[in-house]
Amino acid sequence: MAHSYDSHDVERQTDPRQARRQPGSTRTGGPEHEAQHTGSSQLDPRQTETGRQPDEGTSWTTGTPTDMPRAKTSPLAVSGLVLGLLALLCGLSGVLAPLAIVFGIVGIVLGIMGRKDGMQRHRTGKSVATAGLIMSIIGLVLGVLAGIAFIVGAMNPDLFIPAQQQFGDMMTRVPS
C-alpha cells in the first residue's frame, strides 16, 4: 500500500521540537514513546530549569505573562523633552533667543500634556515629560533674558562699548 502524503508529516519533520521518526515506523504513542523508539531524548527548548513546561500565554524565556501589553512611552512626553532640549540650547546660545522662546512655550505645553498622558494606564513617560518641562522653562527664561539684553543693547549702545573694546583688546593679544 502506497504511503499517502500527510501535511502533518512535513510539520513533524521540520519542527525541531518533535523527535524524528524513523522511515516506515508507525506512531503508537506520545512523544515519550517516540523518543524511546528513535533512541533520542530531545528536550523541548521551552522547558524551564525546573523541568516543567510554562503555562500557555507566558513567555518561555522569562515565564512572565505575554497577554499584558507593554507600557509605551507617551509621544507627547518625548516631544516635550526634545523641544525642551532645543529651547535650552537656543537660550544658551543667546543669538537664537526668539527660537528659544518659541521652543520653550511649545515645550511647556507638550510637557504638561505629556505628564497627564504619562499617568494613564499602559503609558510611561511622566519623568521624561517632567525633564522636558524643566528644560523648556529654563530655555524660555534664558531666551527672554537674551531678548531683553538684545533690546536694551539696541536702545542704548553705550552699554556695550566697553565690552566691545575689551573683546577687541583680547583679540589683538592672542598670538597667531
Image (spheres, rainbow, N blue to C red):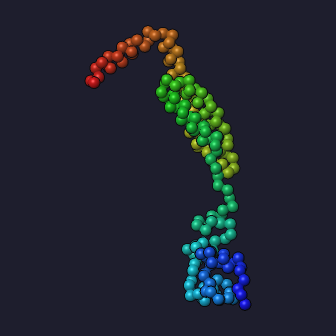
Q: Residue at x 62, y 75 (%)?
A: 14
**Residue 118 placement (x, y as % from top left):** 65, 44
> Where does the C terminus fall, quadrant-wise?
top left
Rendering quarter of residue 160:
top left
Rendering quarter of residue 171:
top left
- Residue 29 can be seen in this image: no
Q: Residue at x 67, y 84 (%)?
A: 30
Q: Nearer the viewer, residue 40 or 75?
A: 40
**Residue 77 placement (x, y as % from top left):** 62, 41
Residue 36 position (above or below residue 119): below
Residue 98 position (above or below residue 40): above
Q: Specify whether 66 is left or right of 81.
A: right
Q: Specify whether 166 is left or right of 145.
A: left
Residue 164 position (above or below residue 14): above
Q: Residue at x 40, y 11 (%)?
A: 161
Q: Residue at x 60, y 33 (%)?
A: 107
> Where does the N terminus fall, quadrant-wise?
bottom right
